Image (tube, rainbow, N blue to C red):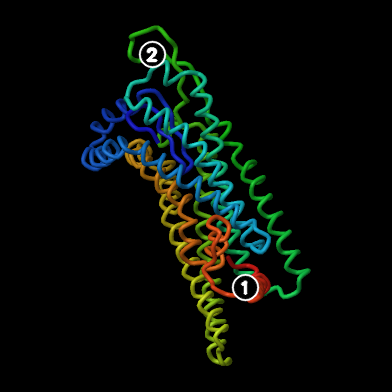
Amino acid sequence: MVFGKGYELCLSGIWYLENNVRCQDSDRVKMTGQPDINEDLERLSTAYGRYHGYASLCVCFSGIITNIFNITVLTRKHMRTPVNTILTGLAIADVITMSSYVPFAIHFYCVNPTSSSTPEKNSIHWMTFLLFHINLTNVTHTISIWLCVSLSIVRYIHIRSPSGASAARLRRINQSKYLVLAVYMTSTIVMIPNYLTNEMKESKNPNNETNNTIFVLKSLRLGSNDTEPLVLVNVWMYAVLAKLVPCLLISIFGGLLLYQMHSKIRLRKSFLKFSGSSHIKLQEHSRTTKMLISVIVLFLLTELPQGVLIILSATKMSFFETVYLPLGDVMDIVALINNAINFVLYCSMSTKFRETFLRLYCGCSVRKQDRNGHALREKADTYTNNNQL
């Protein structure tokens, strides 16, 4: 979101753009008898808004680079698994999201940080890009969310029914490719109400310095009596289909997955004498469990609060202007960090990913083994853990 400038928008799914709306809202807040909470949120918004553009650029540039690392590592021949196919699709969506956010942050935060609207900032070309950016990032963010859900389901299915035969492994890899394609296509179609909701219109220059026409995006008027039906449909669809339902599904399948993994580990401890390699496999399962918990916690912390806030914005009078909008920049940066942090999780919790990355970009290997021993270990990892990183 861009606060104090009349361009309030966020990656959480609601885009609200109207010229000088913040000044009007502060008068309205004083009349509604809610000055304390709103003033605190407004101070937070103003204080952080000065740095959001630069902070988001740092996150986006680092996230684009690390997600390119993810794509190149996960698409290596020995790394091709159903889960890694989904993670590759997730990395591509995150790269698109952050690539679109870079010019947006530069123009609306860094180059034009003032609260006033100007013909240069509100030109038809930049506002057209803004409209494109709104629709594109809503789609890619929705794709990322549902790919996370798909990841938890695919992992659960694999742990419950491991695939041993080569044909079964190849079939699951192909199925995961179709699943990723289906998520991309479905998310694009489901967001059609969002495309229809956002409209650009001409407006007078509020500074009265020139007679130049500026361009703004139409207000959504959420939480008021004159909210358009299409806007409400868009908001409810996004809150339910892109926030609340994914959070519910990933919690269910994530919990089932953790239960299945812990059950298998207990069985191995009870009925097997562990050799050195068995201990290694047990440690790998433990690291996978920790990585899964991290992904689930980050997902829920990012998406569930946004879904609740969107519902409140659509149902509670003035909540959108007085609570949701001031938190927009914070929600944006949290979403961007969530897009950029996966590389850190993969490297810290997946030996196979880390070693492949080091061999690919540094020309070195962590394991000091002979050539045949290393190749046998790599092959065993591919066949016995084909749904793991």
In the rendered structure, the answer to whether residue 65 lies left or right of residue 32 reads: right
- Say if residue 135 shows up in the picture: yes
Indicate left or right for 211 with 377 as reference.
Answer: left
Residue 358 is labelled as none
Quarter of the view holding residue 43: top left
Q: Secondary structure at mark 2?
A: loop
Residue at the spot x=35%, y=40% of the render?
Answer: 319
The N terminus lies in which quarter of the figure? top left
Q: Position of residue 356 (x, y in %)?
A: 57, 62
Q: Residues within 10 Å of mark 1 (few under 14, many from 20)?
A: some
Front residue of 2/256: it is 2
Residue receiving disc 2: 205
Number of marks drawn: 2
Between residue 189 and residue 210, name the one nearer to us.
210
Where residue 211 appears, as percent x and y from the top left, is: 40, 7
Residue 17 horizontal side relative to residue 372, left or right: left
> Residue placed farthest to the right in the image?
167
User: Gap in Å between the C-alphas at discs 1 and 2?
Assistant: 68 Å
Q: Which residue is mark 1?
A: 374
Depicted 204 relative to depicted 372: above or below: above
Secondary structure of the residue carrying numbered label 1: helix
User: Is residue 158 something one can see in this rendering?
Assistant: no
For this orientation, the residue located farthest to the front is 370
Residue type for callout 1: His
Above/below status of 306 relative to 167? above
257 and 87: which is toward the camera: 87
Label 2 crowd bin: few (<14), some (14–19), many (20+), radius 10 Å: some
User: In the picture, which quadrant includes the C terminus?
Assistant: bottom right
**Mark 1 touches mark 2? (CB < 8 Å):** no
Badge 2 amino acid: Asn
